[in-house]
Image (cartoon, helix red, strand yellow):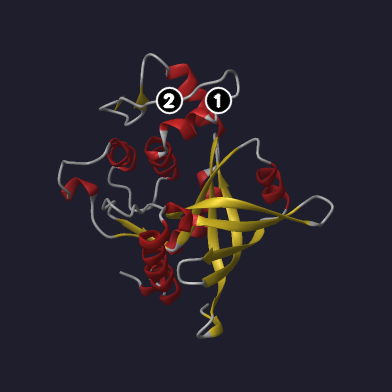
Amino acid sequence: MSTAIKPAWKKWLQSSLQENIAKLGTSATYASIATVKKDNTPAVRTVVMRGFVAEHHTEETGWESDLLVIITDKTSDKVEEIRNNPHTEINWYMNGTMEQFRIGGTIDIVESNFDQSKLNHLHSSMAMRQSLQDMDSHKSLALQSFAKQQQQEQRLNWQAERLRQFIQFGASMRANMVHSQQVKELEINEIDPTSGWYQNSQVQDLLDEAYENFVLLVVKVSSVRHWSPSTGTKSML
C-alpha cells in the first residue's frame, strides 16, 4: 500500500478525531469550510466532515484514501461557489483536546450525471487494499450496494461511492433533500440484488428526488497546519 494514502497528517487527524468523539460525541466532526463568492469575498459555514472517501470508521470497505468528503445539497450556495473557484480552507477545531487542523486544498463535485473522467486526477489518492468479493457476507446495505456497483474495477467507481454514501446517510437527512414536499424520514429497505440500487417501493420517487439533490464534495488536500496549546503551529503537509 502506498504511504501516500496514509500520510502522517491523516494518522494524526484520525487519532485526534477518535479522542474527541470519545469526549464530545459526533459534534467533534463539525468544521468550518471557506469558499469564495462571485464577488471574490469569502463565505464560511459549518459542515459535517464525513471522513475519507471510500472508507468507513466501523466497516471495512477494502479501500483507503486521503481525500476528505463532505455531503451537501446541490441547491446550496457553496456548490456554485466551488464551480467558480475550487480552492478551499477548512478549519477543524476539536474542543475536547483544544487543537485545530487548518486544511487547504481543492474541491471536486460529485453529483448527478457527473463526468467520471474529470476525476481521474484523484486516483493517485486512493488504493484498493482488498477485493470486496473476498470479504465476509455480513455487509451493510451501503457496502452491498458499493460491492455491486464497484465489481472488480481497480479504480474507484464514483457512482458506487456516491450511492454508498447516500444509502448510509441518515433517513432524516435524506428527507431534507426532498424539496417537492415535507418528509420526515426516507428509509431504504433493501437494494436491488443485481444493480445495487436503493429500493423502497413506498417512497421510491422521493428517494430518487433526494438522490438527484445529493452531492459529494471531495477535498484533495494540499496543505495541513496543526495547532495546539502545547505545540503551537506546526506544518504537516
- Return the residue nearer the eye: 210 or 121: 210
Amino acid, disc 1 = Val
The residue sitting at the bottom extreme is 231
Label pair 1/2, CB-CB below 8 angstroms: yes
Q: Look at the numbered disc 2 and give the secondary structure of its residue.
A: loop
Residue 194 vertical placement versus 114 (above, below): above
The quarter in which the N terminus is drawn is bottom left
Q: Residue at x 55, y 25 (%)?
A: 178
- x, y (%) of residue 108? 58, 52
- Return the residue nearer the eye: 131 or 176: 176
Answer with the quarter of the image where residue 22 lies: bottom left
Mark 1–mark 2 Cα distance, whole angstroms, equals: 9 Å
Residue 230 vertical placement versus 162 (above, below): below
The residue at which mark 1 appears reads as 178
Q: Is residue 221 left or right of residue 5?
A: right
Report the label total.
2
Residues packed near mark 2 inside 10 Å, few (<14), some (14 to 19) or many (20 plus): many
Answer with the quarter of the image where residue 17 lies: bottom left
Q: Residue at x 37, y 66 (%)?
A: 19
- x, y (%) of residue 26? 43, 52
Q: Residue at x 48, y 24 (%)?
A: 184
- x, y (%) of residue 154? 33, 53
Q: Residue 4 got which mark?
A: none
The residue at which mark 2 appears reads as 186
- x, y (%) of residue 147? 28, 41
Amino acid, disc 2 = Leu
Q: Is residue 175 left or right of residue 61?
A: right
Q: Look at the numbered disc 1 and give the secondary structure of its residue.
A: loop
